[in-house]
Image (cartoon, helix red, strand yellow):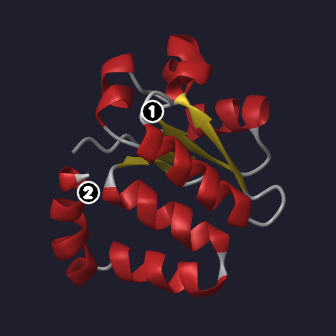
Amino acid sequence: MVDVESRATVRTVRSDFVDGSLLIYDGDCGFCTRSARWIEERWPAHVAVARSFQELGESGLAEVGLTLDQATRQVWWVDEHGVCGAERAVARALRASGGWRRVVGALLASRVGRVVSAPTYRLV
């Protein structure tokens, strides 16, 4: 897993794409697209948007410090704290949606939760 921390590039992309955070997923993956749309519908207004890496293109990915190769391997979450991928991105996306999903995201992000979420993410 690759974690990229870059606050300056996050601000640049956020100003171009969204007022809040950004979920980057594989638009050619049906499961990924359905999951991204499902969570996007549950975020409060202006909290985040979901965009496929195909939509962002290499230049949009580069603005957050990601390569096309990285984007093809896992989902990514971009916010004011930086960029994170895989199960950590899923946890942050859930936490941003509020309600019971926020609790699930917090559990997945915990040390104990990552014991389960990391291998589960790799299976999907």
Which amino acid, mark 2?
A: Tyr
Q: How many marks?
A: 2
Where is residue 10 drawn, in percent x and y? Answer: 60, 38
Work out whether 21 lies above or below 103: above
Which amino acid, mark 1?
A: Asp
Residue 16 in the figure: left or right of residue 108: right
Task: Give the residue drawn at x 31%, y 79%.
Answer: 110
Task: Give the residue drawn at x 43%, y 46%.
Answer: 31
**Labelled disc at residue 26:** 1
Pick the residue in front: 1 or 52: 52
Where is residue 93 drawn, in percent x and y? Answer: 54, 61
Mark 1: secondary structure: loop
Q: Quadrant of residue 60?
A: top right
Where is residue 7 drawn, in percent x and y? Answer: 55, 42
Residue placed furthest toward the front: 30
Task: Give the residue drawn at x 52%, y 30%.
Answer: 64
Work out whether 75 lies above or below 15: below
Work out whether 8 lies above or below 116: above
Residue carrying label 2:
121
